[in-house]
Image (cartoon, rainbow, N blue to C red):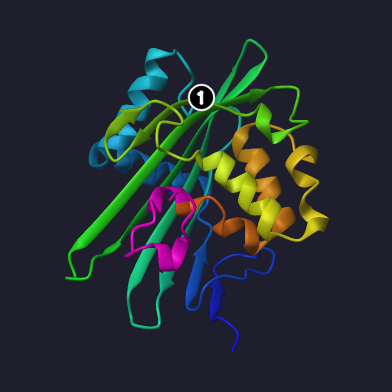
Amino acid sequence: MQPNVQIAQEMPDVTAVANTQVYFPDASSIKAELSQLQTTSATYQAARAEIQARNLLASDQATAQPFGYTMLDESTTGQQARTFNIVEDLGSSDGKDFGLVGVLISGTDERGFPVRKELFELVEKPSSGITDPSQVTVVATFRDGAAMSPGAGVTSVFSAFVDCVKNSCATVCLGSLTACAGAFPVYLKCVAVACGGCALKCGACVACDCGFWCKWATGCCNA
């Protein structure tokens, strides 16, 4: 039996877990959600403080619009999980593009109480383009309200995304990892379009942290 997948906007076919809805809000809607996160998310607040400390551009000053999408998953037992993936352009400096990559997952635990996991990464890549995905560097990591040293017990969102695309997506789209160019939102949207629904699931597992309440929807990649 094929999964029940509904797509709110025209994009490549999406193949995901059963009962999944995928929404692609426009840039203004994404900005509105990010504005709300500035008051509701300690993790996002910490990331924005780091961006300001490094004198990087705010998203409303960057050249590329933010890219993001929301996945609503429902399990066969009625459990639900909402995953919001977001990429912001933070401008360029010294021949490098900077961006903020984030994953937020919300759902309920076994007792029905709300649960939320958040992970944001400040990342950089050569402005000239990527010839190897390893050229993307994680500058700072923020999980569940706290700053963490990159790589200190936390799998990189970008690395997990690349590994997932390489291992799970059709070989015909793998060239997009090096062929796509532009600011981070443009780059990741290009890869997502090339690889379709497979790419949409990639990377979300990192924020889940292999928790039982969310790994059924996102998978588990940092155990």
Front one among 38 and 112: 112
The image shows residue 136 at horizontal and vertical percentages of 62, 29
Q: Is residue 210 left or right of residue 189?
A: left
With respect to residue 73, does 175 lie above or below?
Answer: above
Residue located beneath label 1 in the image: 61
Q: Secondary structure at mark 1?
A: loop
The residue most toward the front is: 223
Q: Over which residues does the magenta segment extend?
A: 206-223
Q: Is 222 contained in the magenta span?
A: yes
Q: Position of residue 197 (x, y in %)?
A: 63, 63
Q: Is residue 106 left or right of residue 124?
A: left
Task: Give the amino acid at mark 1.
Answer: Gln
Magenta stretch containing residue 1, yes or no?
no
Q: Work out which quarter of the rendered image holds the N terminus and state it.
A: bottom right
Q: Looking at the rendering, which quadrant does residue 12 occupy?
A: bottom right
Predominant secondary structure in magenta? loop
**Residue closer to the observer: 132 or 187:** 132
Question: Which residue is outermost to the bottom?
Answer: 1
Classify 125 as above or below 13: above
Q: Is residue 61 above or below residue 106?
A: above
| Residue neighbourhood size for the residue with mark 1, other residues' Cα within 10 Å, grouped as few (<14), some (14–19), many (≥20) | few
